[in-house]
């Protein structure tokens, strides 16, 4: 009997030790904070994604110098935010910026723009979850203008990239949505949408089993009257 009581007491103390640290943080409390400052100039993050193994942060840094920004991707620990790996990508001597990130079991997808051709084009990189190495890179340059991607989402059948292109002229951007293969990044389909002769921009994308949702703005009501626009498309 005495032995049983002692055992119960020890188990209770151990349970308390395990539970107490969790009980100390209330919902919404800061669990950790981290910072990254690759340069004394402009370094910015633009998006984040998470899976069971870490968080993926994307954006730009000015490590090389201001005006020659490059993509920066950091994977960090869920527990304390420490760096698991860091990768950079600098396709051009001009500004290159990563804007959005998505993740699945086979890799992390980063989209943004590069200036490799001398004008901005869409750039999509798939990288390894474990070390950030490149699995594939694809680019899309519909026009000589500043074509831009702003969002990415992924499902079991492909990766969806949205943004805008200047195919119709510098003052008439249109929405652009590309679906690409998970394995090689090759095109599955491309769609565009041009609600007005003015500024129409897609800015974000999400996907579920019933379709792909793109959001942004259009100038259908007039050039100074931007409105919200949402499209659902078959995946
Ligand atoms: Ca650059
Ligand atoms: Ca272009
Ligand atoms: Ca337009």
Image (cartoon, rainbow, N blue to C red):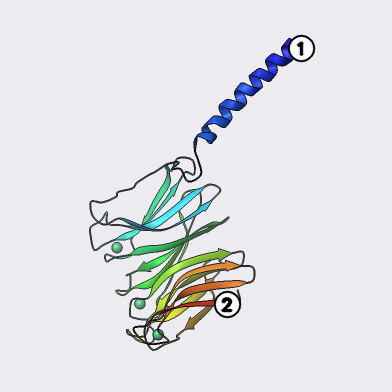
Closer to the camera in the image, 133 or 65: 65
User: x, y percentage for residue 137?
Assistant: 45, 65
Number of numbered markers: 2
For mark 1, give the secondary structure.
loop
| Residue 94 vertical position relative to residue 14 in the rendered view, above or below | below
Residue reaching furthest to the front: 26
Residue 233 in the figure: left or right of residue 198: right
> Does residue 183 appear in this view?
no
Label 1, residues with CA under 10 Å away: few <14, some 14-19, many ≥20: few
Q: Quadrant of the N terminus?
A: top right
Whole-percent x, y for residue 201 in the image = 41, 77
Residue at 53% of width from left, 47% of height from top? 53
| Upstream in sequence: badge 2 or badge 1 | 1
Residue sticking out furthest to the top: 2
Q: Is residue 151 above or below residue 134?
A: below
Q: Position of residue 118 (x, y in %)?
A: 29, 74
Reading the image, the residue beneath label 2 is 233
Q: Local crowd at mark 2 within 10 Å, few (<14), some, or many (≥20)?
A: few
Q: Is mark 1 within 8 Å of ligand 1?
A: no
Q: Residue at x 40, y 64 (%)?
A: 99
Query: Which residue carries the number 1 mark?
Result: 1
Eye-nearest disc, 2 or 1: 1
Mark 2 residue element: strand
Q: Is residue 2 above or below residue 187?
A: above
141 to the left or right of 178: left
């Amino acid at each position: 009997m005495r032995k049983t009581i002692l055992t119960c007491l020890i188990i209770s103390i151990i349970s308390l030790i395990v539970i107490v640290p969790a009980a100390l943080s209330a919902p919404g409390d800061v669990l950790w904070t981290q910072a990254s400052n690759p340069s004394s100039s402009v370094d910015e993050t633009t998006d984040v994604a998470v899976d069971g193994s870490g968080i993926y942060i994307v954006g730009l840094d000015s490590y090389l110098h201001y005006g020659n920004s490059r993509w920066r991707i950091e994977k960090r620990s869920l527990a304390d935010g420490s760096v698991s790996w860091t990768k950079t990508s600098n396709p051009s001597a001009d500004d290159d910026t990563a804007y959005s990130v998505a993740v699945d079991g086979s890799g992390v997808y980063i989209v943004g723009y590069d200036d490799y051709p001398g004008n901005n084009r869409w750039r999509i990189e798939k990288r390894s979850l474990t070390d950030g190495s490149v699995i594939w890179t694809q680019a899309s340059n519909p026009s000589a203008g500043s074509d831009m991607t702003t969002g990415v989402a992924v499902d079991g059948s492909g990766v969806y990239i949205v943004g805008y292109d200047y195919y119709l002229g510098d003052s008439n951007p249109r929405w652009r949505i590309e679906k690409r293969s998970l394995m090689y990044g090759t095109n599955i389909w491309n769609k565009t949408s041009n609600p007005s002769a003015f500024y129409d921009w897609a800015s974000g994308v999400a996907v579920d089993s019933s379709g792909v949702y793109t959001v942004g703005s259009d100038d259908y009501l007039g050039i100074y009257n931007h409105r919200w626009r949402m499209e659902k498309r078959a995946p």
